[in-house]
Image (cartoon, coloured by chain):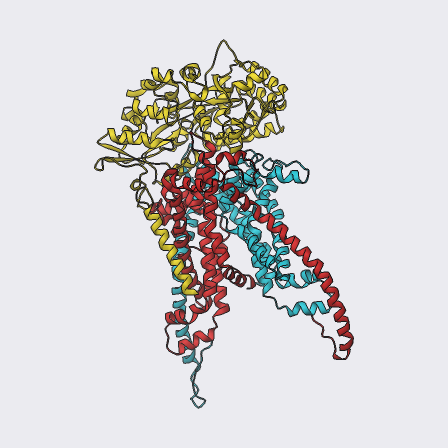
Chain colours: A yellow, B cyan, C red
Amino acid sequence: MKSKLLTSVGLIAVSAVVLTGCSSGGGGGGSSAAASCTNEIVNKDAAQVTVWAWYPAFEAVVDNFNNTHDDVQVCWTNAGQGNDEYTKFSTSIESGSGAPDVIQLESEVLSSFSIRNALVDLTEFGANDIKDKFTPGSWEDASSGDAVYAIPVDGGPMGMLYRQDLFDAAGIAVPTTWEEFAVAAQQLKDAGTGGVLANFPTNGRAFNQALFAQAGSVPFTYDSAKPTDVGIEVNDQGAKDVLEYWDGLVKKDLVTTDDAFTADYNTSLVDGTYAVYLAAAWGPGYLQGLSDADPDAIWRAAPLPQWDAANPVQVNWGGSTFAVTEQAEDKANAAVVAKEIFGTDEAWKIGVEQSALFPSYVPMLESEYFANLEYPFFGGQQINKDVFLEAAAGYEGATFSPFQNYAYDQLTEELYSMVQGEQDGSQALDDLQETLTKYATDQGFKVN
Amino acid sequence: MALTTTSPRTAPPQPSVSRKVGVDKIDRKRQRWGWLFVGPFALVFLGFLIVPLAYAFWMSLQTSTLAAGTQFTWFANYGKAFTDPIFLEGLGRVGRFAIVMIPAQMLVALAAAMVLDNLTTVLSKFSRLMIFVPYAVPGVIGALMWGFLYSPRFGPGSDIFSLFGLDAPSFLSQDNIFGALVNIVTWQWSGYYMIIIYAALRGVDSSVYEAARLDGANSWQIALRVKLPMISSSMVMVLIFSLIGTLQFFTEPQVLRAVAQGAIPVSYTPNMYAYSLAFSYSQFNYASAISFSLGIVVFIGSYLFLFLTRKQNGLK
Amino acid sequence: MAILVPQSDEAVTRTTDRERRRKDQQRSGGRKIGSHIFLLILVIYFLTPLWWLIVASTKDTAGLFGGSGGPLWFDGEFHLFDNIVGLFTQQDGIYWRWLGNSFLYAFAGGIGATVLAVLAGYGFAKYRFRGRSAFFSLLLGSVMVPMTALVIPTFVLMSSLGIVNTMWAVILPSLLSPFGVYLMRVSTQDAVPDELLDAARVDGAGELRTFFQVALPLLRPAIVTVLLVSIVATWNNFFLPLAVLSDPNLLPVTVGLNNWQALSNAGAGGEQVWNLIVTGAFISIIPLIISFLALQKYWQGGLSLGALK
């Protein structure tokens, strides 16, 4: 019995090793992150630059770069998405090793890493030479004062995606202001279909912040040239007005407060529970990817409702960049990768068509191809021309705090307690102001 | 450790000193073997527990702020931890979990084990296995599954509750999340504790039950007055493990957060707080202090519990 | 607690006994049904989520979110094999690599931990060396250390050794099993009598030979239990691999599925793989469940030793 057991245990162990060794991909168990790339290296003699990125269909972009650059090759891994990747990056910064040469970072977390001296200022590597290839808003997000910490890749100018069929059924006109939006919400509820006009997620994070920004809220001021100074005003009038508005809708049951980015939320998006999806430009790709879409649904895109129709304000939700890390041994080549991997028309063809990204890269953005692109999901509507190009052009950039993750977590908690009825929007923001100011002071910042 | 000597009775009396020396020499040689056997484990223990722990402790004695650098601040972090309302709230919460979750698991485990001890049918054997099986499911996968099951849309909640003519509650709301988590852990761990208790019960001599029955005890009395005291040491061991695990509650709320971000804030339990401090906010020093502070509480709690049950736990 | 009935009253006792036994049987008939119903309820409670998992594995993503049979029953279509094929094609079949990794880490870590635990348990049980009780208390106390305290320092340590993001980063820390040492110590004290060891020593056997030839065979059931416990612990390990591994090819199946869940929640262009997550989760728990069923004798026996002492 014992020998039989041991034999079977041994067999399983051996087969495990074989299984692991025979699977696809490069040699696992190598001694460093650079040894194992998800993609194929074309030119084995060239210098290799390690890249962490989670863009969909990114391998094609990597191959495109490797095939067109003889002296530099990209070795790419998907080290996780968003916070998962940031966790690993943060750990590697703390321990002094393990970071990639180039890393995908959303613009909102750039100052959180630049303050830990983890990112290279790319102005020394010719960043400003390509500044005009990117939209001013996205360049602003990737810079801090005179320093440029990353090269923009994609952006998230905001618009409104809505269900034309549900609107028609309830006799609702497409709202162009928030006032009209509230009226439409009431109309939809009265129509009694069981759905709501939209969802107000308390975990919206950058989404919530963008809505505040549209009313003129500027929550943070920060310049990496003076890294210990930070300005915090999250409870300014703009934010309070916006929150009061949404709290009103929540209290009248005109919007739901489901968490965003869960399976429930995704299904509500496609089955008509929400008639409107206030979306960033990557929203269409997101919608299309959701399965079990109602074949009778008719989606269209329209500009985001405005507070003042005469003075429209464009806002942005999300958007990512490529930064070069301080741990990169060959910073020059790493900078080349950061600048050029999404710096060509070919790369962006893939980005637009396969990854559904919205370019900050001006040559693609201003191309006829992109403006006239018809989206079958939207019944052939040219949503870029109609909505997102203008939103992108009007966006001027935003400033994020060097502790943005913490700020967003606290915002989520305050918003949650607001929709639970524990406090009103004004109170929630005042609490947030207090919490963030205390945190910043504890962290040694001089708060203005 | 008796030494079997074969010295004949006619042997001259040995001076006691030299015999003691002889014994000592053998003992010392044995000691070396003791360390040799324990050695490999001790090496790993040193390398992957003591050294990291010492480093973590050293980290907790420093404060590193985002703006300023790192400074040695001795026990300032610990003072901050024990007056940190978030940490204290988390402690209170795991305390409440302990008060609810441990009895829940124990009741299920105990009741199941007692019932199984009386039966030998096929169903009982099958039940024993099926109750144990959830232990085989990794905590992460279990939480993932329950995340689905609790979903108002995809879970069977509405189906099951409508069988009884009720509306399914929203499991992931702020009010219900406590019960939802208690349920997940009970489901996952009761079987494991049941097996331990059942095995202990099997080890009890059944003649004791016979005698009790002759005295006129019914099965309830036998269960409570005879069986329970006889397995008290296993119960204590099971309770201690459960207590330590509950105070360090992390995996299930962390995974469930993905579907309940409002109801489960990042600092829901002290361990989660330490995790987000370290990995989301890059405050590694304070995170270490929080972890150690939690460890101190667990330590005190465990020893207090062992002290209170010193008559039952069978430990010296 | 027993009171022996004096012999002279035997005749009276026997009648009373028969009555009592009859009453017992009547009562126990009802009680037995009650017990079985109780067990049935428990079984339903414990099995329903697993049943859900099995049913869900036969659906595709659309069926998961709006199947005809509801969550607990099959819908019209049977997609289990499609899902399994999907597991082979998604990201070049990385799922099977994850499964292989889990096996590798669990067995390497589990076997390694068992070897160390057997040796250490024997050392603690049979040798009175200086510092023994101090070390053992330290060992028991180590169970109370929250894992979050250890992750960063372990990462830094392994980073300086150059093994972070390799399989050793997961296997080496898994060699630590204080519970295994405790179990082995208790079992060794129980199953290996000192006299046997002394007899072997007197016969001239060295310490090592004594260990291998005398003690080890007696410890077989305990060794299997510790092996199983260690393998399960390493298989279920989530936090450590999450922190130290960034190469997706090295992930164990727990972290891999969690990654897919994060991807599916974020929902970017066609990366919703709920059907694969569910089927993947189902397949991943099969090996452990099979080992449980096959080796339940050892589970019970071994865990009881720990319990009784």
Which x, y percent locates residue A369?
A: 34, 17
Task: Between residue A190 and residue A426, name the one nearer to us.
Answer: A190
Q: Who is closer to the viewer here, A297 or A24? A: A297
Q: Give the residue furthest to the right.
A: C12
Tell me if I can see residue B246 in this picture.
Answer: yes
Image position, residue C72 (x, y; %)? 57, 41
Q: How many marks?
A: 0
Give the farthest residue toward the top: A310
Q: Quadrant of the N terminus of chain A?
A: bottom left
Q: Residue C254 lies in what quarter of the image? A: top left
**A18 to the left or right of A69:** right
Horizontal and vertical percent position of residue A56: 38, 31
Q: Residue furthest front?
A: C76
Task: Please tell me whether residue B11 is drawn above or below residue A214 in the rendered image.
Answer: below
Is residue B205 depicted above or below A188 in this figure? below
Using the rendered view, name the quadrant where residue B238 is placed: bottom right
Provide residue A306's location: percent of width, then percent of height: 51, 14
Can residue B28 be seen here?
A: no
Query: Which residue does the image show at 54% across and 62% down from the upper left?
Result: C304
Camera-side residue of A151 and B308? A151
